[in-house]
Image (spheres, helix red, strand yellow):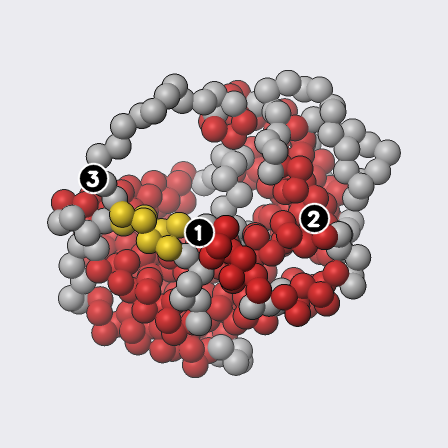
Amino acid sequence: MPEIIRTHLLAHELTHLELETEARAKGRNRFFASTRQTEDAAAALFHGDLRKTKKRGYSDDSLRSLSSLWVRGVSGFLFNCPLDMVIESRLWHRIPALRPAQFISTRKSVDEAYRTNTNTEVREITPGLILRASLALNAAFCLFLDDLYQGATAYAGLYQGEESFALAQRLFRRWRERASQLEPGDEYDLVDDFADMLGLSGWYVWQPDPGEHQATGAARKEGITDPELLKLKQPASFFFLLDALKRFDELPVEEVQKIVFEIGVIGQNGLDYALPDEKYTLTTLPDEKFSGLHLMCLMFAGFKQIAPGHDVGMDLEEPFLKALEAFQVGGA
């Protein structure tokens, strides 16, 4: 990852912690969460779209995984979009020296999101409710950036032809109405405002913050909960990610989706990447066996193609960027 972008992202994440700390000090912090009940209720709203998707050859397991990813992805974006507006505005006004990095980093995010949102195959398979919400949130954030950068950008123009653009303008107006009066914890009320306007109320629950937390046992050192082990695996990850880029470059998006979602189903029981044993198989890639790390890399690279804004929860960004650079110049 380029250092200038890393600098901005670090500042961004630290400001997330700052907002949380400020809200906790006022007794107003709370945690955004999904439950089985909220996910099932949300998925029921696009059940008809899932039936259409099944006709494309997706298995029931893949559809369940896909449905969960859609709901979690949009819910996560719903939570982060207004908070990111608060954070980027705060960074812009409080740390002028960061502005070049902020400008470059947010431009990269806008480009990645737009590539996904305009991908014909992705749009064909995405339920209308999910697509509408995603486009509206992306466009609202673009309106925010255009305003923050005082006309130096015209990102919102990318979405002006979408039916959801009027909704995006309403979201942005709500942000503008409340931005100058936000107190610690008010950003969570802004999430609720956005949810009401998007028709996504009930897709999540708020859990209270008790103010202090006590560990109930030793930290687990397995799976993706061990970032240190994953970092040690970066040399192998590079080659697996390069392999994934080469594979997916020759496949249509729908095939990439099927591979990613099958890995997602397998990963629900955990993927062992501590050992190099090739003990996993995929129906989407028959006649091959994979290690847990190889599957993780396939999944990570796949999401970079079909949903670059989705947080897979794996710290593979650095080896991925190195693999992408090698791929773009013709191989390692």
User: In the figure, 51 relative to 22: above or below?
Assistant: below
Residue contact at pointers 2 and 1, CB within 8 angstroms: no
**Residue 34 - label:** 1
Residue at image position (62%, 25%) is 272
Image disc number at residue 61: 2
Which quarter of the rendered picture does the C terminus lie within?
A: top right
Q: Secondary structure at mark 2?
A: helix
What residue is drawn where x is 62% and y is 36%?
267
Residue drawn at x 60%, y 48% as measured from the top left: 303
Query: For the residue labelled by badge 3, is the local secondary structure a helix, a strand or a loop?
Result: loop
Amino acid on which disc 1 is placed: Ser
Give the amino acid type for the residue marked by disc 2 in the picture. Answer: Asp
Horizontal and vertical percent for residue 56? 78, 61
**Which residue corresponds to mark 3?**
211
* Alpha carbon separation for disc pair 2 and 3: 39 Å
- Sequence-wise, which precedes: disc 2 or disc 3? 2
In the image, residue 298 lies at what x, y percent? 66, 39
* Mark 2 and mark 1: Cα distance apart in space: 20 Å
Q: Residue 153 occupies which quadrant of the picture?
A: bottom left
Which numbered circle lies on residue 239? none
Q: Is residue 311 above or below residue 109?
A: above
Q: Residues within 10 Å of mark 1 (few under 14, many from 20)?
A: some
Q: CA distance from mark 1 to mark 3?
A: 20 Å
Residue 285 position (above or below residue 231) = below
